[in-house]
Image (spheres, rainbow, N blue to C red):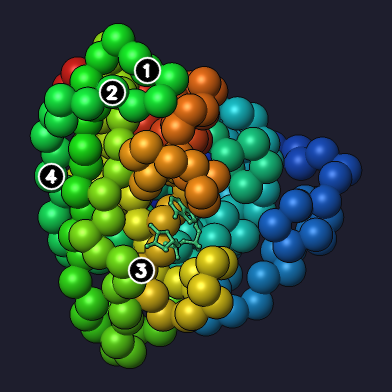
Amino acid sequence: LAGKTPEEVVKKYLQKVKSPPEEDCTICMEPLGGPSGYKGPGVGPVSKAESVGRLTQCGHQYHFQCLVAMYNNGNKDGSLQCPTCKTIYGVKTGNQPAGKMEYHVIPHSLPGHPDCKSIRIIYNIPPGIQGPEHPNPGKPFTARGFPRHCYLPDSEKGRKVLRLLLVAWDRRLIFSVGTSSTTGESDTVIWNEVHHKTEFGSNLTGHGFPDPGHLDNVLEELRAQGITEEDALVE
Ligand code: APR
Ligand code: ZN
């Protein structure tokens, strides 16, 4: 996919729509029957035949040009996500900076999981300079509170979550660079959309145990990033 142009990537996930419905494109809010409302750099003329497309799996329809603009706004990894229903086409990756993920089993039980040991994950990301995939390329970013320690029960489901988190790490989806909602600091490493438990024996922050729904919630959050059990089997 590296060699594909944005237009080629988008086209791969689209079926042609001969007669667009009398609806608005929810990306630009202009009628699908008319031209894309997106006027930005890199918008060339398009033939009528490719002006509207239907995403192959979910069926949502958009101006071709609007999808290309959306793709260009992201990190151009060859994947596309439907802005309406979040269906992911291809393999979604993020902009997590370089760093290290390690884990080991510790011989203690977490509150709510008395019958098993625990897994401690240690994330370490040093500060650095933002790349083109970050909000302010060329500007430094900070990295607070690293190494960050996180916990899972060493149960069957906990180990499954760990396997999927390893996939998420490889796809750069665990952290991102942006503004911390806790501290308000901008240009810093922040948790992405997958919740981690950072407290072991206490629950002062709300990111501790017990929390009976936690593993299922994380599996759901991973699914929303396009990561399911099949991914853990192949990688
Ligand atoms: N532990 C785990 N998750 C957290 C924590 C925490 N202490 N604080 C916030 N989150 C979750 C939030 O619920 C949200 O979903 O991370 C997501 C992003 O929140 P931000 O505040 O933007 O993230 P960040 O700045 O990375 O985290 C703040 O987390 O691990 C600690 O040392 C870190 O104190 C810092 C805190
Ligand atoms: Zn549009």
Q: Judge from the rendering whether residue 155 lies leftward or rightward of residue 211; answer left or right.
A: left
Q: Disc count in the image?
A: 4
CA separation, marks 3 and 2? 30 Å
- Residue 21 location (% of width, % of height): 82, 39
Reading the image, the residue beneath label 2 is 109
In this rendering, which labeled residue sits more in front, label 3 or label 2?
2
Reading the image, the residue beneath label 3 is 189
Asked whether 17 or 160 is in front, the reply is 160
- The residue under the point 41% across, 56% down is 191
- In the rendered view, tell whether residue 55 sits above or below residue 175: above
CA separation, marks 3 and 4? 18 Å
Reading the image, the residue beneath label 4 is 102
CA separation, marks 2 and 4? 19 Å
- The residue under the point 47% across, 80% down is 186
Q: Please state which amino acid type lies under the numbered disc 3.
A: Val
Disc 2 residue crowd, few under 14, some 14–19, many 20+, Cα 10 Å? some
Residue 6 visible in the current orientation: no
Question: Mark 3 falls on what kind of element?
Answer: strand
Reading the image, the residue beneath label 1 is 113
Asked whether 77 or 177 is in front, the reply is 177
Is label 3 within 8 A of ligand 1 (CB to nearest ligand atom)? Answer: yes
Q: Please state which amino acid type lies under the numbered disc 1.
A: His
Q: Judge from the rendering whether residue 176 lies leftward or rightward of residue 66; answer left or right.
A: left
- Between disc 4 and disc 1, whose residue precedes? 4
Marks 3 and 1 in Cβ contact (< 8 Å): no
Q: Judge from the rendering whether residue 223 lies leftward or rightward of residue 151; answer left or right.
A: right
Q: Please state which amino acid type lies under the numbered disc 4.
A: Glu
